[in-house]
Amino acid sequence: MTENNTALVQQEAEAGTVAAEAVGPRKKKRHVNQQKLQDNLWGWLFSLPLIVGTVLFIYIALVMALLLSFTTYSAQVHGNVWEFLGRMFTGETDRFGFTVFMDTVNGEYRTNPWRWYQFVFTDKMYSGELASTMGVSQLSTMGATLFNTVFYLIGIPIGMILSMFLAVCMSRDIKGANVFRVVYYLPCVASTVSIVYTFSNLFSTNGVINELLNTSIPWFGVTGNAFPPGYENGIDPYWTLGTINKCIIVIMNVWKGLGGTIILYIAGLSGVNASTKEAAQIDGANGWKIFWKVTMPDLYPVIFYNVVTSIIGGMQIYAEPELLFPTPAAGSATSNYLNRPNLFTSGYVALIWFWGLQAQTSPGSSTIDLGPQSAGQTLSYQSLGAAYGMVLAVIILVLTLFQFWLDKRNNN
């Protein structure tokens, strides 16, 4: 009897095991880590302003600029940009919005969506007899401002070498190193306007620089309503005083940006492998070889970051040239000659600002006609400014991709 009971119990246990295997193992209830969840929520909360700002002011703005660059949009004529873009996709205007104010030549409607880009690459500076005398009547506005922008990039390698040297000095165990770090970083937190005011006083005719050199060099020859001396003799100020003006801006940008770059290099130097440096010293390597063979490879990520961000920022330079050498006022003798932003010193972004918000002249009826203007009215051409902006975005994208390609190639 006992044996039968035992067998029955075993059969029931086996049957229960088979049934449990058929059903499968029970899923364990996932435990929610409240602390981790709370940390994630706070992280997203603090990141939300940056995410919203990036989406709104970069991605959405980029798409809007791309769309507007193919239209005839002007704020004074068409009003609300959102309504204008909405009409583009609801059929109230044609695909490019040209039916609001049609561009006509000899009674024929033209709907060329690439007209602004054609203007960007073909616009030239002119001013009749005076410009012909100076030999620069065919100077491309895009070419001149891009040349100025690339010229200002000369300050990037100069600033990197100086900041590297100062960072190495400050990373040593010397008295007052922290004080020097603060002093060199002060220009980074100073207002651009105050820095420009300081340099305008330094390089003025009666400024500190001329006092030290015991000279009276007119460093700011291309400014205001006065032409540079000698223009009537055929001297091109673009290659004379214009170059001097650009050199002043390069000096100012190098001085202003040293502090931030020094801080990054000091942080990078603190992560250099100390044991590798010690091993190199034991093997008899001098300081110069240690720097090139040990320190520089460990600093490469910081150097690459500085180069990429500096070039992106340098291609967008605007405030410093415009504050130090402002665009001549409309109606002045110089503005009649330039008829555009100050092509001696202005960066490419000045063209975006000029046509998008500040235009004092029309691109010409052969390009676009936004209708009759009232007396004294000046129109801004946001669509043309958007086209200039898209060209700059493509240039920066190509330069950035090229730098990443070089980085990948060096790593391989």
Image (cartoon, helix red, strand yellow):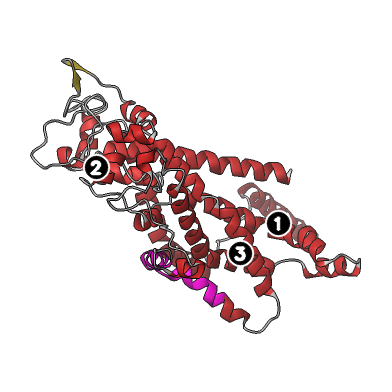
Crowd class of label 3 (few under 14; some 14 to 19; many from 20; radius 10 Å): many
Crowd class of label 2 (few under 14; some 14 to 19; many from 20; radius 10 Å): many
- Which residue bears the numbered disc 1? 13
The N terminus: image quadrant: bottom right
Quick one: 325 or 260, which is closer to the camera? 325
- Look at the numbered disc 3 and give the secondary structure of its residue: helix
- Disc 1, disc 3: CB below 8 Å? no
Q: Residue at x 51, y 64 (%)?
A: 255
- Look at the numbered disc 2 and give the secondary structure of its residue: loop
- Which residue bears the numbered disc 3? 163
Which one is closest to the eye, mark 1 or mark 3? 3
Distance from the alpha carbon under mark 1 to that under mark 3: 78 Å
Distance from the alpha carbon under mark 2 to that under mark 3: 40 Å
Snapshot quadrant of residue 143: top left
Of the residues shown, which amino acid type is indicated by label 3? Answer: Ser
Query: Mark 3 or mark 2, which is nearer the start of the sequence?
Result: 3
